[in-house]
Image: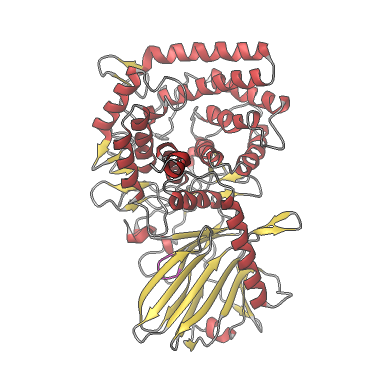
Amino acid sequence: MSSNLNLAAIGNGTIAALVDPNGRIAWCCWPRIDGDPIFSALLGGEEPAGGFFDVVLDGQVKATRRYQANTAIIETVLESADGAKLRITDFAPRFKLYDRIYRPATLVRRIEPLAGTCRVTIRLRPHFNWGEQKPQPVRGSNHMRFSGEDFTVRATTDLPIVYIAEERPFVLGRAATIVLGPDEPFANSLTDTARSFEEKTRDYWHDWVRYLSIPFEWQDAVIRAAISLKLCAYEETGGIVAALTTSIPEAPHSIRNWDYRHCWLRDSYFTVRALNLLGATRTMEDYIRYLTTVIASEPSGRLAPVYSIVPGTPLEERFAPALPGFRGMGPVRVGNQAAEQVQNDGYGHVVLAAAQMFFDHRLPNRGDRALFELLEGVGARAAEFAFEPDAGLWELRGKRRVHTFSSVMSWAACARLARIARVLDLPDRATYWKEQATSIRTRILSFAWNEKMNSFVDADVDGQIDASLLLIADLGFVRPDDPRFIATVERVGSELKRNGYLMRYASEDDFGLPETSFTICSFWYAGALDMIGRRDEAREMFQSLLDRRNEAGLLSEDIDNQTLELWGNIPQTYSMVGLIDTAMRLSKTWEEAFWRGS
């Protein structure tokens, strides 16, 4: 486990923040999860001059933390050598208010003395414009304002402002509150409001978790993963980011550091599917709303692989030179060039993300003819581009090929549309889409199965072994007991496993040979092992992956093959999705574990 990524996530569907083991808020984008990081210490080197918010306890020798059970509220307890102890409680308010969800761009920090004499220094040092602007606070009687070019952040507190503004040490004699939010005055008691917000936010998360359909085993891990996924959804538009961070490298000094605070059609499908498995379908409904806007914005029907969480916002990739990068490993990237790539699996992921809308009788607004016709337009592009060379799901920047996974996703789009048409009692459309799917499948099988390698391969030319091949049975393209799939799983394991975990692929790409395993691939492998009857091995791998989580229960994108440290952006939706999917697959049923006592 990497101490550098030992971060806990808080958020509310508008903003999110990452808190380190000592209670320092080291990352928070404003005024939404893909915005300007006002706290950027995560990308600011070992001893950042700014871009963080912490509480320093004189003589501190120990720090412990925990989430309040089944919530996105984190508590950090600091202790000093002489027995002084205090607790920091951090959260972003989220609760029902006037029949809506109240989720302001606001962070609440409560600091309570628990024992001894707590002499503290509070350091509130926001940065603007990606570390380039270090604003000087403008003091009021009980607040400070930090102004940037695009927005102003107000810190309101019941502590003496001078102690915070000048970072003077003082004795914390009573519980104190600091609320960071929009430049608006507080109308009510700050203390009472913060306490009320915490209670209501706790109640919200408890209610949300209460209705999850979780597996019997690994319940806490699944609940934490589900909450983490929820924090990656930008509720205002329904877009879902791939992770809350940018530019944490996949491996040390690799320059493989990307901005993941955007909505990939592929990653979002996996997130929606995982939450649907748990019964949390609202994220899917919001995401379908987002997709309709995205599709309507592309009159040609050609979809990009990734969009801003606010569709229409450009994602041109640029550097932020004022920030040195994670552990000094820049560059720090803003935006993502992948938006310009051709990745043809996205059409299938759009159709699959929406398919449950037509089959789930719990939903108040089921999929209808209008949504089906919208998806038929996506399916038409899937069929058209099924065998067009693309960058593939691994977003190779150097060359294009006809990738097996992209073609299989085009098949999946057509096959699902046929099933949806049957549900809607549209036999002609069902026949049409079934014929499209059959034609695509026949052609895929003509190039994707390599007799000499005794395995499916990743492309029509120079086919290699690729972890995405582990998904073809789960998608229904082949049966799990198909000897070709069993042989592929065995070949993938023998070629791509490193120190117990799976690489995406083992060949060189635009940046050389990959150095770290890609965490979702290890989950895919565990799932595939279970599919072919090797459940004990699958459970062993799953437990090993659980052991890689940081102390807050989060996983990033990658695992170092030698040190087993976490690398890559965090929390990575792909990885948290893999945890949920695999736990649901491998757990004993409640009946087996509880009623039968097995």
Q: Is residue 257 left or right of residue 500?
A: right
Q: What is the quadrant of the C terminus in the image?
A: top left
The residue located at (72%, 54%) in the rendering is 100
Q: Is residue 598 left or right of residue 281?
A: left
Q: Is residue 262 magenta?
A: no
The percent coordinates of residue 215 (x first, y second) are 47, 43
Residue 35, image quadrant: bottom right
**Is residue 524 in view?**
yes
Residue 159, image quadrant: bottom right
Of residues 179 and 551, the one drawn nearer to the viewer in this rendering: 551
The residue located at (57%, 33%) in the rendering is 353
Direction right: furthest residue? 98
Dominant SS type (magenta):
loop
The percent coordinates of residue 22 (x first, y second) are 41, 70
Report the label total.
0
Q: Which residues are magenta?
A: 20-24
**Is residue 50 in view?**
no
Q: Is residue 341 left or right of residue 331?
A: right
Residue 355 vertical placement versus 307 (above, below): above
The residue located at (52%, 70%) in the rendering is 89
Residue 379 vertical placement versus 566 (above, below): above
The percent coordinates of residue 277 (x first, y second) are 53, 38
Q: What is the quadrant of the N terminus in the image?
A: bottom left
The percent coordinates of residue 561 (x first, y second) are 26, 46
- The type of colouring in the image is secondary structure
Of residues 580 and 263, the one drawn nearer to the viewer in this rendering: 580
